Image (tube, helix red, strand yellow):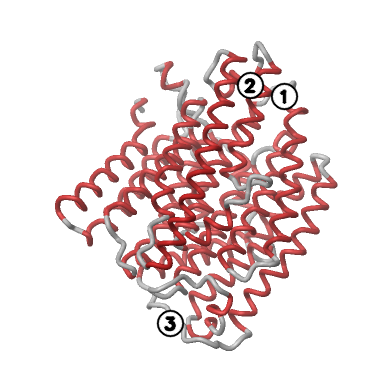
Amino acid sequence: MSSASLYMPHLFLVLGATIVLCLGAFCNMRKALYPITLATVIAAGIACLAAYPAAMPADPALAAFLDTGPLSAFYLPALCILSLIALFFFGPYAMDRKFDRDEPYSMLLFALCGALLMAGGSSWLAFFLGLELLSLPLYVLIAANPTARAADAGTEAALKYFVLGATASACLLFGIAIVYAGSGSMSIATSLAHPEAPNTVLLGLTFILAGVGFKLALAPFHLWAADVYQGAPAPVSGFLASVAKVAAVAALLRVAMVLGPEFWPAFTPGLWFMAAASMVLGNFTALRQTSLKRMLGYSSVAHMGYLLMGVLSVREAGPGPVLFYSVTLAIMDLGAFGGVALLSTRESDADNLENLRDQGEMHPWSAALLGLSLLSLAGLPPTAGFTGKLFVFRAAMSAGHIWLAAIGIVAAIVSLGYYLRALGALYLQKATINWTPPLVGVSGVLAIILVFSSLILLGIIPTPVYDAVAASRGVGLPFGVLGTLILFD
C-alpha cells in the first residue's frame, strides 16, 4: 500500500468540506449537505480502516509526521465512528432549527480532520496543526445557534472558548519550541527519549501539559467547560466532549508512552495533582448545578480525572484501560448530550431540570437514552461506565496509586447525587410546564440504537472487546473498534 493512502482519510474530509461549502454557497442545495457530510465521514472511516496499521512509510518526511502503529489504528477509526454518531444527532437538530447551512457541516468535517491529525501525528508539528484545525471550527460551531437568546449564550461561550483556547495554544506552542530547543528534534518520540538538554525539555513539557490540560478541561484549567457546554448547541457540546477530547487523550497518551525514564518521575506529580483535583472539583461543583448541560460539563471534568489515572498507570498496566475508557466515555457523553438534543424544543435546549420532568413517560426512547447515559456516567452496573471505571481503577491500584484511587472512589460516590437527581426529574416528577420536543427522525433512532446498545453490551460482555483493545496488535485492532461501536460481536 502506498504512503499516499495514509493521507486519504484527511483528504476525504477536506474534499467533503470543500464540496459542502461550494454547494451551500453557489447551488443552495441544503437538502444534500447532510447526506454528503455523512458519506464523507463514512468514507474517511473506511479509509482509516484500510490504511492503518501500516509499515513505516519510505518517505522520511512522511515517516516523521504520521504514526502508523496500533495507537493510530485504534483512535482514527474510532474518531470517525464517534463523529458519525454525533452527526446523527446534529443533522436533525440543525434542520429543525433552520441553521442547516453549509458552514456547520463543513466545520464538523474540518474539526474531524484536525482530530485525526492530532491523534495520529508522530511529530510536534502534527500535534499543533491538528489541535488548531480541531479548535478553530469549534469556535464557529459553539456560536451556531439561531434563536436570539441561544445566539447570545452561544456567542459568549464561543468568545470565552476562543480567548482561553488561544492562550492555551500559545502556551502549547511555546512548550513545543522549548522541547525542540532542548532536543533538536520535532519527533515526539525522539525528543522525549534521550534529549541533549533534559531540563530544558522538561520545562517545555510543563507548558505542553498546561495546553493539553485546557483542551481536556483538567483542573485547574477547567473553568471554561461549564459555560461553553451550556452556551453551545447540545449536539456540538456532545462533539466537544467526545471527539475533541478523545483526540487530546490520544495525543497525551502518545507522549506518556514515549517519555524517557529521566522524565517520568518529574512528569507524574503534575498528572497526579490534576487527576485528583479534577475528580474532586468536577463532582462537587456538579452537585450545585440546576442546569443539565453545566452539570454534564463538570461531570466531564471529573471523568477526565478518572481517565488521567489510566494515563498515570500506562507503564504498569499498558494503554488498554485508557483506550477502552476514553472511547466508552465518549459514547456516554454523546448519549447524554444527544438525549438533551432529542428532548429539546425548537426554541431552546432541555437545559433546566424542570424541562426533564415527566419526559420518561411522554418521550420514552429519548428519555431512556439520556437516563442510560447518566447511569453509565455514574458507573452503575451493568453499563459500560461501570466496566470502564473498573479497568481504570484496577490499573491505578496495580501501579501503586492507592490514594488517588481512593479519592476517585469517594468522588464517584458523590457523583451519584447529581446523576440521580436528573434521573428523578425524568421519571419521578410531574411536568409543571408545557414542553414538547419535535418527533425523533430516522437519524435520531439510529443514534439511539447505536449508543444504547453499545453502553449495554460493553457493560455486559466487555472482556472480548477489552482484550482486543489491550492487545493492540495488527489489523484486528481497528476491526475490534468497529465491532465495539457498530455492535457486530
Taking depth in this image into account, of 50 and 335 the one nearest to the observer is 335
Q: Quadrant of residue 440?
A: bottom left
User: Where does residue 143 sit, x and y in percent of width and height?
Assistant: 41, 55
Above or below for 411 versus 243: below
Amino acid type shown at disc 3 = Thr
Q: Which residue occupies 45% across, 73% down?
A: 344
User: Where does residue 271 sit, x and y in percent of width and height?
Assistant: 72, 38
Q: Quadrant of the N terminus?
A: top left
Amino acid type shown at disc 2 = Leu
Amino acid type shown at disc 1 = Phe
Residue to which mark 2 is pinned: 192
The numbered disc on residue 263 is 1
Q: Are marks 2 and 1 in contact (CB under 8 Å)?
A: yes
The numbered disc on residue 467 is none
| Pair 2/3: label in front | 3
Residue 468 shows in this picture: no
Above or below for 296 versus 60: below
Q: Label 1 neighbourhood size at 10 Å, few (<14), some (14-19), many (20+)?
A: some
Q: Secondary structure at mark 3?
A: loop
Q: Label 2 neighbourhood size at 10 Å, few (<14), some (14-19), many (20+)?
A: many
Q: Quadrant of residue 190?
A: top right
Residue 17 shows in this picture: yes
